[in-house]
Image (cartoon, grey):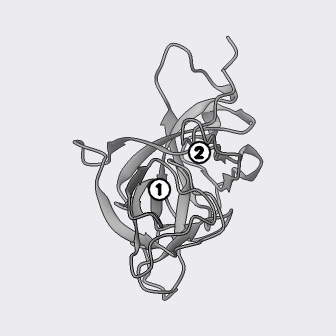
Amino acid sequence: MSNVNRAVGLLPVGHLSGGTPQRMSEYTIAGGYGTDIFYGDPVKATGTGKNIALAAAGDRLTGVFAGCQYIDTSGAIQYRAFWPASTQVQSGTQVKAFVIDDPSTVFEIQASGDLAEGDIRAAANILAGDGNAATGNSGVQLDSDSVSTGTGKQLKILGLAERADNDYGVNANVRVVISLHELAGPATAV
């Protein structure tokens, strides 16, 4: 069986202690921020208040983007699964960004290439991908080429996502936790 190539970013599927995976906090996005942020995209702190930005491979992560709310320039409240790049908001208002930031959240993500059973408990970085403006979903994947047993990687691989349409190999979907997390491990200033 071959796996379907259908990257949708990091999807919350559980918690290390069991229970509900959707433990979110409210952050902000700078009005006019010029990069799309899709549902399932990993985000990082910018160092300005609680502002977040799209994360790249190797960045320490704040969590995973789960939508936003803002008041557009006409005064209408907008609820979106993704942040459209360079969107202008009403003067004097802030963009509310919802981020799944609990370090114990378990996510499911597609691997960019081949993964084997021996990769369980290894670590890897994210690989940027194009999001889908029609669905609002991310295109981020686990970077199969970065899998190693070393430290300093963003994701820890817990195991294969157990579904009938999923198996080890190219584009396998795996369960992960964020291992390079801003709210876990040694405290560092941003």
Q: To which residue does mark 2 refer? A: 138
- Which SS class for mark 1? strand
| Residue 184 in view, yes or no | no
Q: Residue 85 has which mark?
A: none
Q: Residue furthest left?
A: 19
Q: Is residue 84 left or right of residue 39?
A: right
- The spot of residue 145 in percent (x, y) is 77, 48
Residue at horizontal 67%, vertical 64%? 56
* Viewer-nearest residue: 44 or 185: 44
Kind of residue sitting beneath label 2? Ser
Q: To which residue does mark 1 refer? A: 65
- Distance, label 2 to label 1, CA atoms, is 9 Å
- Which SS class for mark 2? loop
Q: Residues within 10 Å of mark 2 (few under 14, many from 20)?
A: many
User: Looking at the image, do the residues carrying marks 2 and 1 touch, with CB atoms under 8 Å apart?
Assistant: yes
The quadrant of the rendering that contains the N terminus is top right
Q: Is residue 5 above or below residue 94?
A: above
Q: Quadrant of residue 151?
A: bottom right
Kind of residue sitting beneath label 1? Phe
Which is more N-terminal, label 1 or label 2? 1
| Residue 62 in view, yes or no | yes
Residue at horizontal 50%, vertical 48%? 39
